[in-house]
Amino acid sequence: MRVLIVEDEKRLALSLARGLTAEGFAVDVAHDGIDGLHRATEGPYDLIVLDIMLPGMNGYRVCSELRAAGDETPILMLTAKDGEYDEAEGLDTGADDYLTKPFSYVVLLARVRALLRRRTRGGASVLRVGELTVDPGARRVTLGGSEVALTAKEFAVLEYLAVRAGEVVSKAEVLEHVWDFAYEGDVNIVEVYVSALRRKLGPDVIATVRGAGYRLVGPGV
């Protein structure tokens, strides 16, 4: 899943980005409200971590503009302020949750996962492709009823292919959704993770469409 962090405290933003990346998220970072709003409207994100006190445009306005444009991406607001009024104002603009600094990273991660679970329950909570199931909220994969252990990045690649099941997905599309915006490495990293998934799920689960990309077929289909 792809997360946007909009936070002007660069050390905090970097720390959060590293932590979420280690959990398997693709993370982009913006350090002011204007850039944050631009990125949020240009890219498909599963969740936005949004500071309130931002240069250029504060988090309240970023949130309200996204909601006014019909963007329902879950938003977790961060602030150094503390008080019922501030929290109420943040939630009134359309934020889904609120966390006051200083906070524990463990608490933030729990809030992030809770918001993502809430979102998936609002739609299809479990992705099913034949005998393969992918549960984004629980981060759980089963094949024929048996659980399959995947690394965080393997799960992220499989989840995106499952969302697009039956469609041809290019390497560039996988990179854009699973790796962060600033990734400049070899595009063939996608092949490495597809090969790992085939070893764990079976060689026919992910088909290669020569010159175009991959298609998740799923066993038993």
Image (cartoon, rainbow, N blue to C red):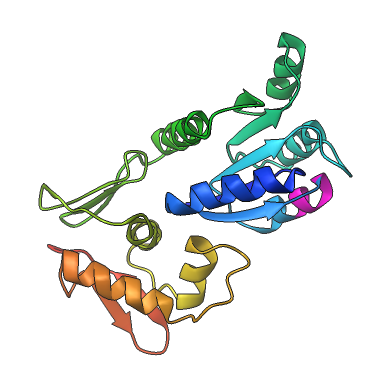
Image x and y of residue 50, in percent: 69, 38
Q: Horizontal placement of 29 versus 170: left or right?
A: right
The residue sitting at 64% across, 26% down in the picture is: 102
Query: Residue 53: percent from the left, percent from the top?
Result: 81, 33
Left or right: 115 as drawn, with respect to 137: right
**Which of the 4 image quadrants contains residue 87?**
top right
Image quadrant for the C terminus? bottom left
Task: In this rendered view, identify the residue nearer to me: 132 or 55.
Answer: 55
Residue situated furthest front in the rendering: 11
Outermost residue to the top: 84
Q: Is residue 111 above or below residue 9?
A: above
The residue at the point 35 percent across, 39 percent down is: 125
Q: Taking 172 as reference, is 6 above or below it?
A: above
Report which quarter residue 77 is drawn in: top right
Q: Residue at x 79, y 53 (%)?
A: 35
Q: What is the magenta range?
A: 33-38
Question: For the view shown, which residue lies furthest in the bottom direction?
Answer: 211
Q: Main secondary structure of the magenta part?
A: helix
Quadrant position of residue 81: top right
Q: Closest to the observer: 29 or 128?
A: 29
Residue drawn at (27%, 77%), measured in percent from left and top? Answer: 207
Q: Is residue 179 above or below residue 204?
A: above
